[in-house]
Structure formats: structure tokens, C-alpha cells
Image (spheres, rainbow, N blue to C red):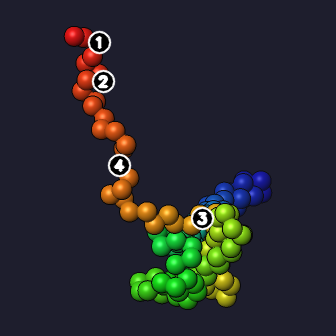
């Protein structure tokens, strides 16, 4: 009888091993699925972060352009020549701007605050910069010559002769 028991248990071992292999495959499949889900989630977040970074970089560039235009035109003339709020021209028409020029008094520079906004899903993002810009001195450049001509050659080679 003991012989039959041993023979009987030997017959069931291969079936038990098949069940164990099936469990290995199921656990491996679940682990693979979790790994793929995590990888796709990270890839999706990185693409979103890259898109946000590109929009912030574009907004910062547009903000720099606004402040440069205030500097070129001068704070007094800027509001007469350029719009102080609105949308940018295409391809940047998804961005809005606002420029605030505050006169701080005679002899003082203007306080210039520039803001660029854009929509991100259901929210609005913005970048803002604030700086001081003095009045333009409209003196012509051709009058800005030295009072005496500069002789650079004799200045450098005087000691050798």
C-alpha cells in the first residue's frame, strides 16, 4: 500500500508544477502591466512638463520683447505708439499682454510692469517682470563726438621711439 501512495503522489506532482507555472505567468503578467502603466504615466507627465516649459519660455521671450520695446520707444512715447494691453500677433495669438507705465515724478525713472498671460487647460498662467526705465534722451547721435580727436597710434607707440 505504501508503494501505491508513493506512486500516486508522484503522478500528481507534474500537475502541481503546471499550476505553479501558471501562477508564475499570472504574477509576471500583473507585474509587467504595472510596470507599463508606470512607464506610460511618467512619459505622459514628461510630455506635459515639456509643453509647459516651452510655453513659459515663449512667454518669457515675449515679456523681454515688450520691455525692450518700452526701452526703445521710451516710456512716454510707448503708450502713444504701441498698445499697452491686448493679444500678440500670430503665431503668438494665444498669449495676452499688459504693460503698466507708472510715472514716479520729475527726474525719476518710470516703473514699468509687463505681464504675459496664456491659458493652460482650465487655468491661466502668467509671467511678470518689473523694472525701472528712464526717459529717453533724444539727443542726436552725430553730435556725440569727442571734444578732441584721439590719436591712438601715438598713444601706444610713443614709448618705443
9 is higher (above) or lower (below) than 49? above
Packing grade of label 1 (10 A; few <14, some 14-19, many >=20) is few
Q: Which residue sits at x=52%, y=71%?
A: 74
Q: In the picture, residue 35 is in which quadrant?
A: bottom right
Percent of width and height locating residue 110: 65, 69
Q: In the picture, residue 126 is in which quadrant?
A: bottom right
Quick check: marks 2 and 4 in contact, CB under 8 Å?
no
**Could you tell me how far apart the alpha carbons at marks 3 and 2 are, in whole angstroms?**
38 Å
Q: Given the current orientation, which residue lies at the most extreme front position?
A: 147
Q: Given the current orientation, which residue lies at the most extreme right position?
A: 1
**Could you tell me how far apart the alpha carbons at marks 2 and 4 are, in whole angstroms?**
19 Å
Name the element at disc 4.
Answer: loop
10 is higher (above) or lower (below) than 23? above
Name the element at disc 1.
Answer: loop
The residue that mark 4 highlights is: 145
Q: Which residue sits at x=37%, y=43%?
A: 147
Mark nearer the viewer, 1 or 4: 4
Mark nearer the viewer, 3 or 2: 2
Earlier sequence position, callout 1 versus callout 4: 4
The residue that mark 3 highlights is: 133
Percent of width and height locating residue 111: 67, 68
Earlier sequence position, callout 3 versus callout 4: 3
Q: In the picture, residue 60 is in which quadrant?
A: bottom right
Mark nearer the viewer, 3 or 4: 4
Name the element at disc 2.
Answer: helix
Percent of width and height locating residue 41: 61, 71
Classify residue 124 as left or right of residue 146.
Answer: right
The residue that mark 1 highlights is: 159
**Could you tell me how far apart the alpha carbons at marks 3 and 4 are, in whole angstroms?**
25 Å
Packing grade of label 4 (10 A; few <14, some 14-19, many >=20) is few
Mark sitting on residue 155 = 2
Residue 80 visible in the shown view: yes
Amino acid at each position: 500500500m505504501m508503494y501505491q501512495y508513493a506512486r500516486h503522489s508522484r503522478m500528481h506532482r507534474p500537475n502541481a508544477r503546471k499550476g505553479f507555472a501558471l501562477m508564475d505567468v499570472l504574477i509576471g503578467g500583473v507585474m509587467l502591466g504595472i510596470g507599463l502603466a508606470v512607464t506610460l504615466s511618467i512619459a505622459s507627465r514628461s510630455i506635459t512638463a515639456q509643453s509647459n516649459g516651452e510655453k513659459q519660455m515663449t512667454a518669457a521671450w515675449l515679456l523681454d520683447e515688450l520691455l525692450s520695446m518700452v526701452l526703445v520707444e521710451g516710456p512716454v512715447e510707448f503708450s502713444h505708439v504701441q498698445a499697452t494691453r491686448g493679444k500678440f500677433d500670430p503665431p503668438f495669438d494665444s498669449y495676452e499682454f499688459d504693460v503698466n507705465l507708472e510715472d514716479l515724478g520729475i527726474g525719476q525713472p518710470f516703473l514699468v510692469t509687463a505681464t504675459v498671460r496664456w491659458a493652460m487647460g482650465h487655468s491661466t498662467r502668467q509671467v511678470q517682470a518689473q523694472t525701472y526705465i528712464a526717459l529717453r534722451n533724444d539727443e542726436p547721435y552725430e553730435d556725440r563726438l569727442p571734444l578732441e580727436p584721439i590719436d591712438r597710434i601715438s598713444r601706444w607707440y610713443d614709448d618705443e621711439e
